[in-house]
Image: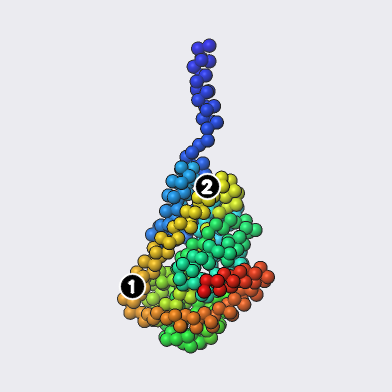
């Protein structure tokens, strides 16, 4: 009897513990991405993780894995589909193989330069439709994160739009980007990113397009003499979650997560702008000829490139792509 009376309170305590929900780390999400810990994406993922942890009382924990620790982007996206990874924040440019509709973001000058107008486009019917297009791909897309814009560089002068004619530019393997350069009278050559520096150095291609911080980090300016700040290509990230994990979250936690990702966007944009300014200063100091395209030149670029690139997008994506492009057009026109 003595043994029974000794065990009784222990059993009672265990029963209470099992009946009481745990408030620490009820939900743990591993989130993989490719950038370093100093870059804008990771810095603001840390902020999102803090907000989510605080607002769920510690019930939701984000564990961040930067710099491709969990694999390349394709492997991480597949992991999210399979459920071996809860989430990833991926450049849209790496997702066309999973969801061809997202390649609409390859169209030059798709996203307005004005940050308020760009935010309205992301948050409105176009952004919603683009995120919804992932729903039948085994992925839940909850937000678009801005991650800078692309610029043109070349070993040959880029004095105006006519200077592009006859030049050879490296692109990612995208029919939309190929048509972008065809519209300028240039040749587009699809090459792996890892081969780009050598290709520029040896003259396999004359030029390339990338964000300024990438141009600086990869030292492309060492083998390029001219740079035009054109801001022609939006670099957007897509925040992707595994559907089973996402649906396992209480609705209020899902709202908290969505709100946290949206809330940090202004700070993310400002952080990225500082990195871009630092990169531009370093490139100028290297002796590269840097020219800032004015509003009229950018409008001319858009007029020349937008329609051919859009046609390539619709040819690739069919009726669904045309419907998304129509949604975009209506939303874009309402901004002006």
Quarter of the image for residue 45 reads bottom left
The count of marks equals: 2
57, above or below 142, in the image: above
Q: Residue at x 38, y 59 (%)?
A: 38
Name the residue beneath numbered marker 2.
Answer: 253
Residue 173 visible in this rendered orientation of the protein:
no
In-front residue for pair 267/106:
267
x and y percent of residue 311 in the render? 62, 77
Report whether 201 appears left or right of 11.
Answer: left
Q: Residue furthest left?
A: 285
Q: Is residue 105 visible?
A: yes
Residue designated by label 1: 282
**Element assignment for label 1:** helix
**Which residue lies at the image location 53% right of the left edge and 15% below the top edge?**
4
Report whether 333 appears left or right of 160.
right
Question: Residue 115 at what x, y percent from top left?
Answer: 45, 68
The secondary element bearing badge 2 is classed as helix
The residues bearing labels 2 and 1 have C-alpha atoms spaced at a distance of 43 Å
User: Which residue is rendered at x = 62% and y = 62% of the image?
Assistant: 133
Q: Residue 322's quadrant in the figure?
A: bottom right
Q: Position of residue 301 (x, y in %)?
A: 50, 81
Disc 2 versus disc 1: nearer the observer: 2
Q: Position of residue 231 (x, y in %)?
A: 45, 74
The residue nearer to you, when weighing 180 against 304, is 304
Precedes in sequence: disc 2 or disc 1: 2
Mark 2 surroundings within 10 Å by alpha-carbon count, few (fewer than 14), some (14 through 19), many (20 or more): some
């Amino acid at each position: 009897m003595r043994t029974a009376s000794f065990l009784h309170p222990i059993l009672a305590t265990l029963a209470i513990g099992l009946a009481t929900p745990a408030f620490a780390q009820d939900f743990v999400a591993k989130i993989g991405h490719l950038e370093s810990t100093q870059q804008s994406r990771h810095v603001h993922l840390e902020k999102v993780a803090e907000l989510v942890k605080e607002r769920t009382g510690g019930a939701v924990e984000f564990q961040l894995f930067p710099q491709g620790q969990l694999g390349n982007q394709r492997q991480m996206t597949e992991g999210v589909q399979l459920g071996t990874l809860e989430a990833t924040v991926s450049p849209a440019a790496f997702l066309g193989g999973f969801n061809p509709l997202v390649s609409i973001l390859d169209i030059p000058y798709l996203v307005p330069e004005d940050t308020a107008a760009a935010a309205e486009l992301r948050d409105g019917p176009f952004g919603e439709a683009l995120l919804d297009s992932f729903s039948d791909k085994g992925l839940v897309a909850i937000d678009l994160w801005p991650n800078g814009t692309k610029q043109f560089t070349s070993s040959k002068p880029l004095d105006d739009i006519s200077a592009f004619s006859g030049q050879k530019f490296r692109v990612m393997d995208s029919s939309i980007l190929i048509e972008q350069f065809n519209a300028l009278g240039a040749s587009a050559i699809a090459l792996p990113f890892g081969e780009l520096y050598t290709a520029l150095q040896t003259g396999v291609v004359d030029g390339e397009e990338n964000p300024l911080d990438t141009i600086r980090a990869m030292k492309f300016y060492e083998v390029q003499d001219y740079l035009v700040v054109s801001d022609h290509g939006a670099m957007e990230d897509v925040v992707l979650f595994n559907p089973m994990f996402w649906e396992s979250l209480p609705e209020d936690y899902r709202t908290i997560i969505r709100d946290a990702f949206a809330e940090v966007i202004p700070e993310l944009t400002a952080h990225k702008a500082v990195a871009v300014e630092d990169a531009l200063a370093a490139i100028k100091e290297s002796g590269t000829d840097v020219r800032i395209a004015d509003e009229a030149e950018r409008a001319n670029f858009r007029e020349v490139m937008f329609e051919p690139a859009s046609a390539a997008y619709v040819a690739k994506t069919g009726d669904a792509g045309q419907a998304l492009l129509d949604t975009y057009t209506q939303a874009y026109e309402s901004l002006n």
